[in-house]
Amino acid sequence: MSETKSNECFSISLEYISSKIPDKGITIGNFLDLMGDRGGLILCLILATPFLIPVSIPGSSIPFGLGIMFIGISRIFNRYLIPKFIMEYVLPKDTLLKILNGTMTALGKLEKYIKPRFLVLSEGPAISRFSISLMVFTSFLLMLPLPVPLTDSLPGYSIFFLVLGILEHDGYFILAGYILTIITTIYFSLIFLFGYAGITFVLSHFGIYMPQF
């Protein structure tokens, strides 16, 4: 699972990929083949996008989180360890195009800020495995069925920034992913320790008010 560097903008690459999706949809395995050498991480980026923007895909956090988790584990061990049922999971064309459009919109706003820098966090096998391990951890949090605000979006943003930083060798984006992972971990810990009522009470002392059900 080697990673190659490309100077082509992601938004252009994704636009090309969008044009190649069959009307009947495409399996995750075929989608990985379509995207080439960096397909696994690019797919993680795409699967995280619905949790950044208001794209309504009910029940997507578990299958998408599983996909991200197994892709991450595969990269850690440098070979595909993705179960057959995930590789054969069919992504409907309409849903996938909606996600790709959302990804292109998000990337269009960020691409001009992305560049190789702060390489101590973006190069070397050890730091790369650490970053991907955090991605695997946050994908597990993403899958937890908690009916609480931000339990999808916080892991989604963590994954998105980590993957984007790894792909583009941008240590600042990776650092942002680390910070978001810490915030996400604290947030989930508060939920498990105090419940939703408890976390709203704690956050209210910091001037952060959560929606009430």
Image (tube, grey):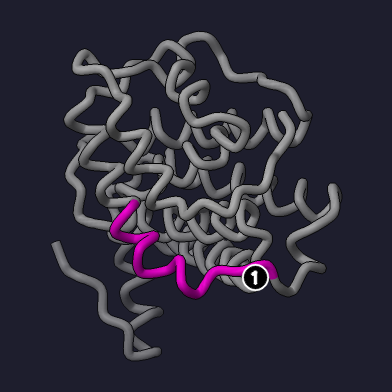
The residue range painted magenta reads: 104-116
Where residue 191 sits, quadrant-wise, is bottom left
Q: Relative to 130, is 96 on the left or the right?
A: left
Residue 121 at x, y = what percent? 76, 65
Q: In this view, does 166 lie above or below 136?
A: below
Residue at 85 percent across and 54 percent down: it is 124
Viewer-side residue, 52 vs 172: 172
Residue 32 inside the magenta-drawn segment = no
Q: Main secondary structure of the magenta part?
A: helix
State the quadrant of the N terminus.
top right
Viewer-side residue, 174 vs 93: 93
Residue 128 at x, y = what percent? 76, 51
Q: Which residue is tagged 1?
A: 175
State the quadrant of the C terminus.
bottom left
Q: Relative to 3, is 137 on the left or the right?
A: left
Residue at 56 percent across and 29 percent down: it is 36
Residue 17 at x, y = what percent? 37, 34
Residue at 40 percent across and 40 percent down: it is 47
Q: In this view, does 210 lie above or below 14?
A: below
